[in-house]
Amino acid sequence: MKYVNAQRRSLRTAASGERGFSASALAAAARRVDVAEGAWKKYRDAHCTMIENSFTTGTGSFSARVACQIRLTRSRLHQVWEDGWTKLPEPQ
């Protein structure tokens, strides 16, 4: 996800050389981004698996899972953008 990657790069760049910031604090923040993103992916996968498993008949389960992943990922992109961690344009 380019917005989350931009967030990580911004924190790591700041940690490696910007004045006025504690390098260790910024590096810790970058690690927290990684942890948060990993937790979010686990949530997305578990939630969308539940959606997929709710289809007991028919062929719509895979499509439902993919639609769920797309919907949640778009929501997450906008959430990361709203939090102001990236200078990228607003996701569509």
Image (cartoon, helix red, strand yellow):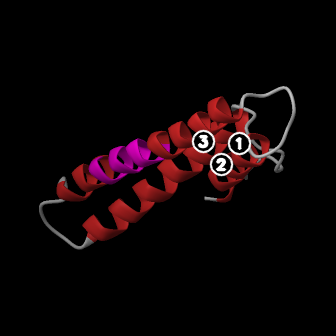
Tell me which residue sits at (77%, 48%) in the image: 13
Q: Would you say the residues marked 3 and 2 are in contact, meaning their CB atoms lie under 8 Å apart?
A: yes
> Which SS class for mark 2?
helix
66 vs 6: above or below = below
Pointers 1 and 2 in contact (C-beta within 8 Å):
yes
Estimate the x, y position of residue 27 in percent, counting from the top left.
62, 39
Check disc 3 and report its element: helix, strand or loop: helix
CA–CA distance in space, label 1 to label 2 = 5 Å
- Horizontally, is 70 left or right of 5 in the view? left
Magenta span includes 31:
no
Question: In the drawing, does residue 20 fall left or right of residue 83?
Answer: right
User: Eyeballing the image, is 26 above or below 4?
Assistant: above
Residue marked by disc 2: 8
Distance CA(mark 3)–CA(mark 2): 6 Å
Give the amino acid type for the residue marked by disc 1 in the picture: Leu
CB-based contact (under 8 Å), mark 1 and mark 3: yes
Q: Amino acid at mark 3?
A: Ala
Rendered residue at 82%/50% (across/down): 88
- The span shown in magenta is 37-46
Describe the element under mark 1 as helix, strand or loop: helix
Does residue 57 sit above or below 44 in this rendering? below
Q: Amino acid at mark 2?
A: Arg
Q: Residue furthest right?
A: 19
Residue bearing mark 3 = 30
Residue highlighted by disc 1: 11
Crowd band around label 1 with a 10 angstrom C-alpha radius: few (<14), some (14–19), many (20+):
many
For the residue pair 69 and 57, the one nearer the viewer reads as 69
Where residue 23 sits: x, y (%)? 70, 35
Q: Residue at x 64, y 40 (%)?
A: 80
Picture coordinates of residue 28 (x, y %)? 57, 35
- Using a 10 Å C-alpha cutoff, classify the residue at mark 2 as few (fewer than 14 neighbours), some (14 to 19) or many (20 or more): many
Name the disc covering residue 71, or none. none
